[in-house]
Image (spheres, grey):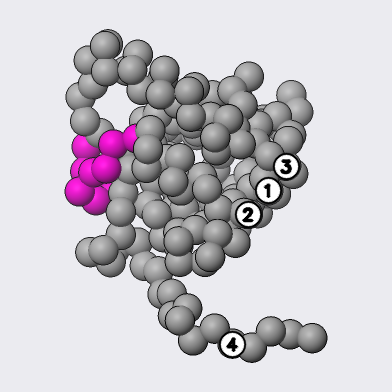
Amino acid sequence: MIPDDDPSRPLTVAHPDDPGTTYVSLVGNTYAMLVTGEQTGGRYCLIGMYVPDGGGPPPHRHDFEEMFTVLEGEIEFTFRGEKHVALAGTTINVPANAPHHFRNASGAPVRMLCMCTPAGQDEYFLRIGNVIDGKDAPAPELSAKDLAERRRLAAELASTYRTEFL
């Protein structure tokens, strides 16, 4: 039987240009927290990703599902050691626990959506990145000491957020 509706949960409408959208600068990318785990009761989160040429995270894996839809540009995904190029309109699902990473080697910016289920990646990014004013705001200048501290914090919190760097 389907449970009763929970009227305490409102409709969520996300638009990246909404002034209430939180943007995070992380590893050279800009991430927009479009739908958070708090809004979905922890079921999933949706992150808008703006990845400049040369951008992308290091190899990693997580104990949750992650799905990407490329909206603009093309991006290279490495999944279990095998490279795949994803063009605009492509959706890629990365199964839980599988090693992967992506890199923009296209020479142009890439825009994509990332859905993680269950949620948590949104919180992790907020804890290890820098909140910035908008999708076009420059990344903050971090000293070598600040970068080292960020890497230390990311590694320290990784297991809390079900992530492992490879």
Disc 1 or 2, which lies upstream in sequence? Answer: 1
Amino acid under disc 3:
Ala
Name the main secondary structure of what is drawn in magenta: loop
Foreground tag (4 vs 3) = 4
Q: Is residue 119 left or right of residue 16?
A: right
C-beta proximity under 8 Å, tags 3 and 1 = yes
Disc 3 or 1, which lies upstream in sequence? Answer: 1
Q: Is residue 62 left or right of residue 112?
A: right
Q: Which residue is mark 4?
A: 5
Q: Which residue is mark 2?
A: 117
Which residue is found at the position 42% from the left and 40% from the top? Answer: 125
From what the image shows, is residue 27 above or below residue 138? above
What is the crowding at mark 4: few (fewer than 14 residues within 10 Å), some, or many (at least 20)? few
The Cα atoms of the two marked residues, 2 and 4, are separated by: 21 Å
The Cα atoms of the two marked residues, 1 and 4, are separated by: 26 Å
C-beta proximity under 8 Å, tags 1 and 4 = no
Residue 150: percent from left, percent from top: 36, 22
Q: Residue furthest right?
A: 1
Describe the element under mark 4 as helix, strand or loop. loop
C-beta proximity under 8 Å, tags 2 and 4 = no
Which residues make up the magenta segment? Answer: 129-138
Foreground tag (2 vs 4) = 4
Tell me, for residue 96, which label it has, or none: 3
The Cα atoms of the two marked residues, 1 and 2, are separated by: 5 Å
Foreground tag (1 vs 4) = 4
